[in-house]
Amino acid sequence: MTKSASDKPMRRNTGATPYAAIWFTLGGAGFGYLCVAFFAPHLLPDFSGGRMSLGETQVMRVSSDVYDLKTSLSKLQADVESVKADVATQANQTQQLSTQLAALDDKVHAAPMQASALVQSSPPPTPDVPDFGSGASQARVDHAPDAATPTKVINATPDAPQVGAPIVTGSISKSTKTASDTDAISFGPAVVKPAPKPIGIQIATDSSVDGLRVTWSALSQTHADQLGTLIAHYADLGTAANPSYGLIAGPIKSKADAKKICKELAAQSVSCKVSDFKGSVL
């Protein structure tokens, strides 16, 4: 029995169809584009037309803002470091000034104590009184050379005085005195003229004497040309409830000189006024 033609198996056409060829060509082109984009992107044309997307613009703007913020923070940090350095320098200078003022205060307190110690330690001078009880004075009198004997002059006239002879001086007798000499000398009433008060300048006030000592130490060193030769006194200007002491420097020869010194000190921002040189030694 023979099989019909429809029962025979059909063979698959092994030839490439046009549809497969098109897909193969598109796949190769896409693979080549990816290779070029990966290994040599600069060879591909720019299809954006030179315009960036909205996301890229925002990213660039944020980056610029971040850079400006970093720059501002760097400047602020530099300013903070500069302020810290200035504060440290000022603190160091203040500490040095406090140390110098403390040393000057110690010297001022130690000076009166040293002066009083020297006065107490030095013995009073003993007068040179001769010892009359000893025989030294008598011996000097006893051993005094004898009076020189007069020298005789040969061929001298009788009226010529001898050498070594005592000289006779004339005297006025009481009878030759005039009447005006016998009159008593009369004087008028005594006139007492008060001594002029010494002049000084008041350059500071404080509630304590120790504060005036510190002020005087600083002013006498800073303004040595005007105050270097003057002496400091303190005068009580306040009351028991409100104590106040004035720093007075002097003595000064005249009020004109005092006004001149005050003018020079006022030009250097130091308060000054002419006053009597009174009070106690500072």
Image: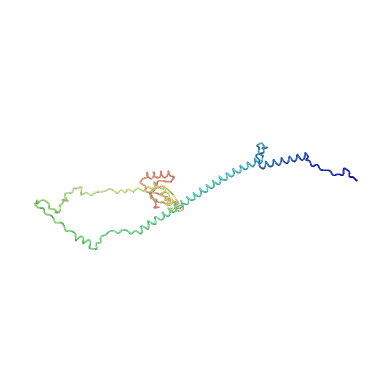
Quick check: 145 above or below 51? Answer: below
- Left or right of 128? Residue 255 is right
Residue 84 or 117: which is nearer the viewer?
84
Q: How is the image coloured?
A: rainbow
In percent of width and height, residue 280 lies at 39, 52
Front position in the image: 82 or 119 = 82
- Provide residue 57's location: percent of width, then percent of height: 64, 40
Left or right? Give the position of 182 relative to 223: left
* Residue 264, horizontal then vertical, whole percent: 40, 44
**Residue sitting farthest toward the front:** 1
> Residue placed farthest to the right in the image?
1
Q: Name, please, the residue furthest toward the top.
A: 49
Count how many numbered circles sit on residues in the image. 0
Q: Nearer the viewer, residue 64 or 19?
A: 19
| 103 lies left or right of 149 | right
Image coords of residue 124 (percent x, y) = 32, 58
